Amino acid sequence: MTFPVPSSRLHARPVLMTRQCLIFLLLLAALVSLPSGASCAEYGKDVTVSLCFTPGSNCTDKIIREIASARSEILIQAYSFTSAPIAKALIEAHKRGVKVAAILDKSQRTAKYTSATFLANMRIPTYIDAKHAIAHNKVIVIDGAVTITGSFNFTKAAEEKNAENLLIIRSREIAKAYRENWHDHLSHSEQYKPKY
C-alpha cells in the first residue's frame, strides 16, 4: 500500500510512501516516552497498527472494543479523562476480574468530578502523577500485547470536536516498553483516594 503526498506541498512530483515507512514514522511518533535508559528502537515485522482519526471515525468505540477483549490487565495513563463510555468499559473489565489501574495528570485531582474520582470510588487503583509540569500521556496497555496511544484524550471533546489521532498497536515488544514506562511513572505517583 502506498500513500501519495500532494505535490503542492513538495513543489515537485508526488512522492509515494511505503506502508513500512509509514508504520515506522507512526511508531516513532508514538514512542515519545520510553522507560528510563531506553532509546528509540526499530521493531520487528510482528507489529500491526490500526489507525483512527477524529472527527469522522468513532475512536471511542474502538477503545471500548479493545478494553472489552482484555483478559488480564489494563494499564492507563491519561492527561484528560472524562469519557463516561471508556470509564464504564474499564469498570466492566474490572468486574470480570481484569486488573485495571490508572495514572492520571494532577489536573484530574482538582477537577470537580472526573474519571479519577469515578475509578477510585469503584476501587480501581488510581494514581496521580504530579512530578511533571503535565503528565501528557494518552496510553492504554492491554494484556501486555496491545498499546493504544496518540493525541486522542479520553474525552467526549476528543471524539466529537477535536482533530485527533489514535493508534492501536499490536506488538508485545512495544507493549512491554509502554508497560515499563507506566511502572516508572507509578513509582513517583501518589494514590488517589476514593471519596466514599
Image: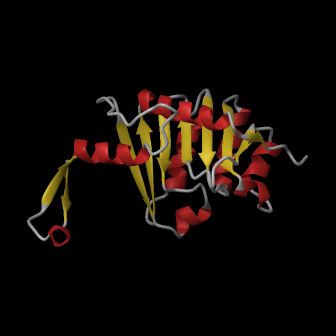
Residue 130 in percent (x, y) is at 70, 48
Q: Residue at x 37, y 42 (%)?
A: 49
Q: Residue extending furthest left?
A: 13
In screen coordinates, is 101 left or right of 178?
right
Number of labels in the image equals: 0
Residue at 68% across, 55% down: 84
Q: Position of residue 181 (x, y in %)?
A: 55, 35
Answer yes or no: is residue 145 visible. no
- Residue 68 occupies quadrant: top right
Residue 146 placed where, x, y %? 48, 35
User: Which residue shows up at 53% across the image and 52% down it?
Assistant: 61
The reply to whether residue 98 is visible in this rendering is yes
Point 8% across, 65% down: residue: 13
Q: Is residue 141 left or right of residue 1?
A: right
**Which of the pair 106/174 is nearer the observer?**
106
- Reply above or below: 168 against 58: above
Residue 56: name its quadrant. bottom left
Q: Nearer the viewer, residue 140 or 185?
A: 185
Q: Position of residue 121 (x, y in %)?
A: 83, 45
The picture quadrant where one finds residue 45 is top left
